[in-house]
Image (cartoon, helix red, strand yellow):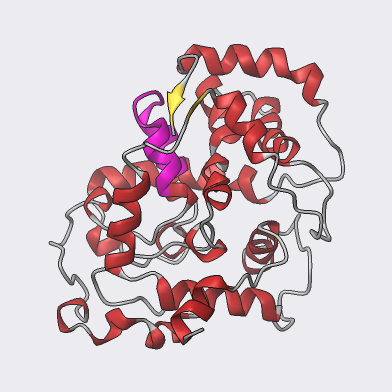
């Protein structure tokens, strides 16, 4: 096995939730202190970002968007997709034994409890469904992780940015400027951001959900932009006008994992009715 094959087959995280737990450590609130923020990051998370930052090249992103964003993988309903995702078992997650559907409902039920619009509630239910990419055989580093722009100079505001030295794009001259292959203010929709569940789910939902929801889905992992201020020179005024929605959503995405499990069967009629308000019976994935 050569080095590239070894990197591609590695699975550094014990569960996909482990990346989310790391986010809680990096972005705590007064109400949510969680683990010791100053503690050394877990080796599995560090190894995950080494793989992510080494492999997510501009060419890789373009290839994966071509492979998946044409939506030729499956045809199924949204609820069927949730049940499909439920086969991705996180038995080793130390913080929760909730199923994937329960985890999605924890987010959406918190949004619902705060009186947000129905499309916002549905966004909470949908936002992580793109993780079905793992069930298509994609490695973790191509599914989750803080996202970042490719095709331009890597930002030092991206977590573990030192690993970008191993990315082949760091040797491509045209990518070594602030703007790279892009025009200033071109808009984030023109930027090839590292591939994962956000971009994939955006394409699944783009014909059915309002813009505010689509921004939440597409950019909720783009922490270098909406938390650290990186890449704002590429954003449009419209992108910036949508950022408050992303920030509002992330409060629920980050801080709703609890030991209280929602009653899926009791809630199912409500959510099936909500899904049918926005989506047809079957959609392409």
Tell me the quarter of the picture where residue 92 sits: bottom right
Tell me the quarter of the picture where residue 21 sits: bottom right
Q: Position of residue 79 (x, y in %)?
A: 61, 24
Q: Position of residue 197 (x, y in %)?
A: 49, 49
Does residue 244 appear to the left or right of 248 in the view shown?
A: left
> Residue drawn at (52%, 49%), measured in percent from left and top?
136
Q: Position of residue 231 (x, y in %)?
A: 31, 65
Dominant secondary structure, magenta: helix
Q: Examine the rendered structure and indicate whether residue 99 appears above or below residue 145.
A: above
Q: Is residue 235 magenta?
A: no
Q: Which residue is outermost to the right?
A: 259
Does residue 152 appear to the left or right of 214 in the view shown?
A: left
> Residue drawn at (19%, 79%), measured in percent from left and top?
177
Classify the position of the C terminus by image quarter: top left
Q: Examine the rendered structure and indicate whether residue 257 appears above or below residue 75.
A: below
> Residue drawn at (25%, 57%), measured in percent from left and top?
191
- Is residue 159 shown to the viewer in this render? no
Q: Between residues 5 and 35, which one lies in front from this camera angle?
A: 5
The residues colored magenta run 199-217
Tell me the quarter of the picture where residue 266 sits: top right
Q: Position of residue 5 (x, y in %)?
A: 48, 77
């Amino acid at each position: 096995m050569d080095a590239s094959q070894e990197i591609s087959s590695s699975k550094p995280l014990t569960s996909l939730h482990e990346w989310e737990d790391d986010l809680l450590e990096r972005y705590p609130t007064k109400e949510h202190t969680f683990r010791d923020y100053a503690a050394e990051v877990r080796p599995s998370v560090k190894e995950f970002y080494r793989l992510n930052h080494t492999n997510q090249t501009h060419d890789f992103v373009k290839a994966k968007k071509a492979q998946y964003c044409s939506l030729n993988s499956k045809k199924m309903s949204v609820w069927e997709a949730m049940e499909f995702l439920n086969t991705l078992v996180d038995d080793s997650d130390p913080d929760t034994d909730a199923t994937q559907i329960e985890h999605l409902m924890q987010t959406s039920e918190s949004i619902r409890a705060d009186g947000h619009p129905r499309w916002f509630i549905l966004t909470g239910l949908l936002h992580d469904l793109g993780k079905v990419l793992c069930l298509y055989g994609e490695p973790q580093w191509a599914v989750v992780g803080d996202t970042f722009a490719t095709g331009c100079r890597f930002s030092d505001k991206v977590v573990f940015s030192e690993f970008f030295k191993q990315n082949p794009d760091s040797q491509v001259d045209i990518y070594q400027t602030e703007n790279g292959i892009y025009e200033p203010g071109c808009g984030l929709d023109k930027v090839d951001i590292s591939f994962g569940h956000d971009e994939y789910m955006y394409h699944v939902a783009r014909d059915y959900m309002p813009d505010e929801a689509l921004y939440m889905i597409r950019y909720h992992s783009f922490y270098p932009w909406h938390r650290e201020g990186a890449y704002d020179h590429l954003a449009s005024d419209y992108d910036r006008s949508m950022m408050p929605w992303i920030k509002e959503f992330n409060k629920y995405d980050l801080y709703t994992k609890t030991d209280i499990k929602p009653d899926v069967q009791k809630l199912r009629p409500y959510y099936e009715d909500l899904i049918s308000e926005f989506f047809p019976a079957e959609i392409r994935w």
